[in-house]
Amino acid sequence: MKTIRALLAIFLLVAGIYAGYKIVPVYINNYQLQDALDEEVKLNTYTLKSENDMRQSIYKKAQSLDIPVTPEQIEVKRAGNTVSISTQYTMHVDLPLYPLDLTFAPSSKNKSVI
């Protein structure tokens, strides 16, 4: 009985490590994309960079992170001194017996102090 418990504990530990190995990078990439959105909004609140240029910059960052988003899915709005960027995407994680689809919706908005 003790060997069965030990084997079960080892199996659960290995399964948990494997799931983390597959899922954690997806969340890290989302965090990096969110950081890129925040940076883009902060830098371009006071510049005249066009919405399309901001969209292309975010699209390039998403591509470098292997995030499945198209330029059309990236919504950039500039209204006066306010800049906002948002997008939504789903990442598929293939886990044995339990494949999952994780949906993310990173966004950022910055308003000028002036």
Image (cartoon, rainbow, N blue to C red):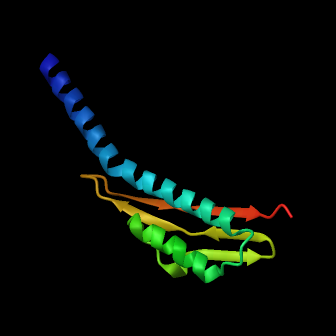
Q: Residue at x 66, y 78 (%)?
A: 49
Task: Indicate left or right for 53 with 69 as reference.
Answer: right
Q: Residue at x 25, y 40 (%)?
A: 15
Q: Position of residue 29 (x, y in %)?
A: 44, 57
Name the quadrant of the C terminus. bottom right
Task: Indicate left or right for 34 with 7 as reference.
Answer: right
Q: Is residue 1 visible?
A: no
Q: Position of residue 87 (x, y in %)?
A: 56, 69
Q: Nearer the viewer, residue 50 or 3?
A: 50
Q: Position of residue 19 (x, y in %)?
A: 31, 45
The single residue placed furthest to the right in the displayed view is 114
Residue 75 image-quadrant placement = bottom right
The tally of labels here is 0
Q: Nearer the viewer, residue 23 or 77?
A: 77
Q: Residue at x 15, y 24 (%)?
A: 4
The single residue placed furthest to the top in the displayed view is 2
* Up/down of 51 relative to 108, above or below: below
Q: Is residue 26 visible?
A: yes
Task: Indicate left or right for 76 with 6 as reference.
Answer: right
Q: Nearer the viewer, residue 9 or 45?
A: 45
Q: Position of residue 86 (x, y in %)?
A: 61, 68
Name the quadrant of the N terminus. top left
The single residue placed furthest to the front in the displayed view is 47
Q: Residue at x 75, y 69 (%)?
A: 46
